[in-house]
Image: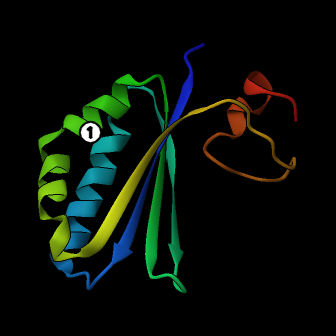
Amino acid sequence: MSDIYSATFIFSKKEYDQSFFDLDSRIVAIASQTPGYIGCDHVEDIQQNRLINIYYWQGRDGLEQLVHHPIHRQAKAQYQQWLDNYQVIIAKVEQVYQSQDHQHPLTPFTTTLGPR
């Protein structure tokens, strides 16, 4: 089995317009078509005015395809229109723990990556 990777995008928000939402939707669609794509989480931290998107892949190929895709590069070039700043964290997932009734994109990997 290939390693599992996550890419966490943390955005400190300015004002979003329809162009931002259109571009973000396109990136989500592109990511979901890359090899090894497992799923994603979207979290909004209202107190700190942050948006957090976490994508998961089995293997690095899909992650690399997303990072180098022209639409992702366009978003990166235009980020100052919608964001004060951003951070990206790429991580290898070592283990997944969860309660039995929790549903998550990594749920199928709980027993193969580590103990429950």
In-front residue for pair 11/33: 11
Question: Could you tell me which residue is drawn at 23 percent across and 55 percent down?
Answer: 26
Question: Could you tell me which residue is drawn at 68 percent across and 29 percent down?
Answer: 94
> Which residue lies under the disc numbered 1?
67
Callout 1, which amino acid?
A: Val
In the depicted structure, whether residue 18 falls above or below residue 114:
below
Question: Could you tell me which residue is drawn at 15 percent across and 75 percent down?
Answer: 81
**Mark 1 falls on what kind of element?**
helix
> Which quadrant would the N terminus be assigned to in this image?
top right
In the depicted structure, whether residue 86 falls above or below residue 91:
below
Q: Residues within 10 Å of mark 1 (few under 14, many from 20)?
A: some
Asked if residue 24 lies left or right of residue 71, the reply is right
> Which quadrant would the C terminus be assigned to in this image?
top right
Q: How many marks?
A: 1
Asked if residue 83 lies left or right of residue 91, the reply is left
Please say which color scheme the image uses: rainbow
In the depicted structure, whether residue 96 falls above or below residue 15:
above
The image quadrant that residue 69 belongs to is top left
Q: Position of residue 74 (x, y in %)?
A: 11, 53
Q: Position of residue 65 (x, y in %)?
A: 26, 31
In-front residue for pair 15/101: 15
Asked if residue 4 lies left or right of residue 87, the reply is right
Q: Position of residue 71 (x, y in %)?
A: 15, 49
Question: Could you tell me which residue is drawn at 20 percent across and 82 percent down?
Answer: 17
Q: Position of residue 25 (x, y in %)?
A: 28, 60
Furthest residue toward top: 1
